[in-house]
Amino acid sequence: MPAAGFTGASLLLVADLVARHVLPTELPTGVVTGAVGAPYLLWLLATANRAGSGG
């Protein structure tokens, strides 16, 4: 459980740093997090569907 909390906190910290300092315009952190999370979710759904365990 501590590893999951550390991973989530690290993801949000990196997304916040990218949203504030890396991109040319400042964006909300949720936009950056969604831009990373949405493709990952689609990949998880696709692999689960191929394995026959998702839908």
Image (cartoon, helix red, strand yellow):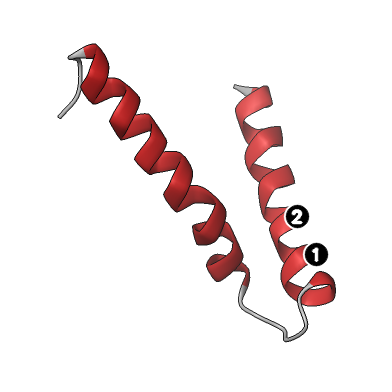
21 or 12, nearer to the observer = 21
Q: Are marks 2 and 1 in contact (CB under 8 Å)?
A: yes
Looking at this view, name the residue that lies furthest to the front: 50
Q: Amino acid at mark 2?
A: Leu
Q: Residues within 10 Å of mark 1 (few under 14, many from 20)?
A: few
Tell whether 50 sits left or right of 2.
left
In the picture of the structure, the residue carrying the numbered disc 2 is 13
Tell whether 45 sits left or right of 4.
left
Q: Residues within 10 Å of mark 2 (few under 14, many from 20)?
A: some
Q: Above or below — where is 48 with respect to 46?
A: above
Q: Above or below — where is 23 with respect to 34?
A: below
Q: Amino acid at mark 1?
A: Leu
Q: CA distance from mark 2 to mark 1?
A: 6 Å
Secondary structure type for disc 2? helix
In the picture of the structure, the residue carrying the numbered disc 1 is 17
Secondary structure type for disc 1? helix
Q: Residue at x 73, y 86 (%)?
A: 25
6 or 23, nearer to the observer = 23
How far across and how far down the image is residue 23, in percent? Answer: 76, 75
- Say which quadrant the N terminus sits in: top right
Quarter assignment of residue 13: bottom right
Tell whether 3 sits left or right of 54.
right
Quarter assignment of residue 44: top left
Q: Residue at x 61, y 29 (%)?
A: 4
16 or 46, nearer to the observer = 46
Looking at this view, name the residue that lies furthest to the right: 21
